Image (cartoon, rainbow, N blue to C red):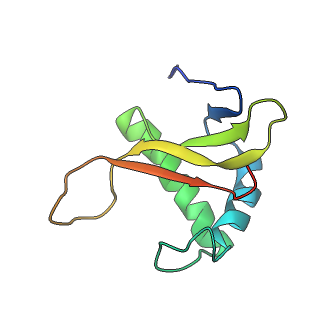
Amino acid sequence: MDIPTIVTDRRRPRRWVAAHREPFAAMNSEPEAMEHFLCTLSRNESDELVERIVAGFEANGFGLWALELADAGGFIGFTSLSVPGFKGPLTPAMEVGWRQVRWA
């Protein structure tokens, strides 16, 4: 599926690739990055999240884009819209998801 992307001077969204998994897991293991979540994620939990994100693209035609530095490449986070994977008083719904490494 060809999905258009928006590239800024600093960041480039792209579909998830294997090279994103390790830096994504490192970000998810940082307490500061996960401050507003219940807990940090293990490598396995982080990889499972990537699988759910990829499956969301396939199921919905959209999802959370991996973010890279536009000029140098390299994973720095993710952003976009997604469908929450839980039931709650406000679902069904859409959510804006984002997480970025502190230094980017």
Q: Which residue does the image show at 81% across and 29% down from the upper left? A: 71
Quadrant for residue 8, please give it: top right
Residue 58 falls left or right of residue 46: left
Foreground residue among 96 and 3: 96
Q: Which residue does the image show at 61% across and 65% down from the upper left? A: 46
27 in relation to 57, above or below: below
Residue 84 falls left or right of residue 33: left
Q: Could you tell me residue 11's position as x and y percent? A: 68, 34
Q: Could you tell me residue 15's position as x and y percent? A: 61, 36
Q: Could you tell me residue 72's position as x and y percent? A: 85, 35
Foreground residue among 87 and 30: 30
Q: How many marks?
A: 0
Residue 6 falls left or right of residue 69: left
Residue 102 falls left or right of residue 57: right
Q: Could you tell me residue 57's position as x and y percent? A: 45, 38
Q: Which residue does the image show at 62% across and 34% down from the upper left? A: 13
37 in relation to 8, above or below: below
Residue 86 seen: yes
Quadrant for residue 102, please give it: bottom right
Looking at the image, the residue that sits furthest to the left is 89
Residue 64 seen: no
